[in-house]
Image (cartoon, coloured by chain):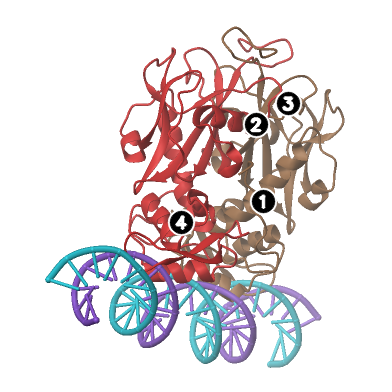
Chain colours: A red, B brown, C purple, D cyan
Amino acid sequence: MNRALKHDGTMPAAVTVDLVIFTVRAAALHVLLIERGMPPFEGELALPGGYVRAGEDLDQAALRELAEETGINGHELHLEQLRTFGAPERDPRGRTFTVAYLALGPDLPTPVAGTDAATACWVPVDVALSSELAFDHLIILKEGLDRARAKLEYTTVAAAFCRQPFTIADLRRVYEVIWGFPLDPSNFRRKVTKAAHFVEPTGESRTPEIGRPAALYRRGSAELLFPPMPRSADGEHEVQPSAATG
Amino acid sequence: MNRALKHDGTMPAAVTVDLVIFTVRAAALHVLLIERGMPPFEGELALPGGYVRAGEDLDQAALRELAEETGINGHELHLEQLRTFGAPERDPRGRTFTVAYLALGPDLPTPVAGTDAATACWVPVDVALSSELAFDHLIILKEGLDRARAKLEYTTVAAAFCRQPFTIADLRRVYEVIWGFPLDPSNFRRKVTKAAHFVEPTGESRTPEIGRPAALYRRGSAELLFPPMPRSADGEHEVQPSAATG
DNA sequence: TCGTATTTAGGTCCTCCTGACCATAAGTCG
DNA sequence: CGACTTATGGTCAGGAGGACCTAAATACGA
């Protein structure tokens, strides 16, 4: 009854991980893209990723790919599963499922070209969103962006974009860059400093090129932010980007 | 370099979907469990699920399994991807990845025993949580419960548990059962009716066995709830249940 | 040396939302 | 009719957030 099934009902398939790696640099949100060095989609832009290896957990595979593509050990940044994509025809080589991951980190070094990546580079997300990406990677990128924007609201992951220690203004710029509109500096400070364990003052301060020195903070222990960071600027009440049919 | 890899780098693996199906009945949250009718874990309790078939998308596979196990066509209920589990030794038959789904629906009919399920039945979640489940299904169930609890806060999915039309008290009982503590009826009504497009009045009312008749509502168009439903009862500030290493 | 520009830090007012109540309405049951 | 139960609606105080405004601390230039 089912084509391509083995006697025990299993269907042989390949499983990959793909990573949406975001960082904030030069007042813009960037995503790491590679130019594919082999078919299919040779020469096209794609998200970094690769096959899950035999003894490997999914998180391990994501961390390994992260290290291979960026030279960063993933313990410094935020990593979470996004969603798994498995449309039957999404890979011309055969049935392939990909577990998409979202990675968020501070301004990362310019990546080295990996094994199967001809080149790897940081691309502003607005540029990437209007590009053609291999496979279904454009959809994955969009979902990653939606997830990142949503998570800024009710979690403290914004701090994952800041190299420690950081100033309140650094943290505010993360929100402004990812949400795409300015926040009131005064109200933002009040919100962040009064929230329990979002940021902890170090007691030190840093003098910028111009302006008054800013107090330095480091991440607190809180993961959730309650009440959430308000995001009232116009584009509100959009449909939630989650998964399936419902 | 890698054992069990084909020449092109792929590792043959099986992909399944498993479903955490929640419903509210008799003032308690229930989850659908099956007793496995074949090895491995024959005779043990497990989440319903099965292999993704050849031409099938992941969502399609989840909907098919849902129909097979409960006789319900999934378009009446909320369905979303939870997370993918792929620990190397999670299935003794060989490398198997499972895409876990979360399904939420109104008091569903008693399920029919499916093809590979000896028996299927609704189990109170507190009972299920203290049971032994096959594979890593207990972890999946816990994550599904965490996700459901969290989603009640900032989305309108609670209405997916109510057969339409429903009363405000019906909706409130969903929150109370899933969160595990009572909510103030008056404040809950104010919150729900003033939130934009959470519920829409039908103009009709229903007389219960005892007490004043209650106005009937149906689901509004909103998916997100802003500001969120407050969940201040003690167990607050717990670590977020999300995915990976971070 | 003394303003000026710039950025941080902190305060004020007002409005909305929420928690904790209380009061009333509209049914059923004895 | 009166007791009970549930639904509906209102009040009041406290907290959080948006829209401001003021002061502090630095670099720079006249």
Q: Residues within 10 Å of mark 1 (few under 14, many from 20)?
A: some
- What's the residue type where badge 3 is placed? Pro
State the SS at label 3.
Answer: loop
Which numbered mark, 2 or 3, is in the foreground of this view? 2
Given residues B163 and A8, the one toward you in this image is A8
- Look at the numbered discs 2 and 3 and tell me whether their residues touch, using CB distance below 8 Å: no
Q: Earlier in the sequence, mark 4 or mark 3?
A: 3
Callout 4: chain? B
Which numbered mark, 4 or 1, is in the foreground of this view? 1
Please give the label number shown on residue A60. Answer: 2
- Look at the numbered discs 4 and 3 and tell me whether their residues touch, using CB distance below 8 Å: no
Which numbered mark, 2 or 4, is in the foreground of this view? 2
Q: Earlier in the sequence, mark 1 or mark 3?
A: 3
- Look at the numbered discs 1 and 3 and tell me whether their residues touch, using CB distance below 8 Å: no
Structural distance between the alpha carbons of marks 4 and 3:
43 Å
State the SS at label 2.
Answer: helix
Image position, residue A22 (x, y; %):
45, 41
Structural distance between the alpha carbons of marks 4 and 1:
25 Å
Q: Is residue D8 above or below residue B175?
A: below
Image check: A170 left or right of A101? left
Given residues B42 and D8, the one toward you in this image is B42
Q: Which residue is mark 3?
A: B88
Q: Quadrant of residue B57?
A: top right
Which numbered mark, 4 or 3, is in the foreground of this view? 3
Structural distance between the alpha carbons of marks 2 and 3:
11 Å
Which residue: 71% across, 66% down? B181
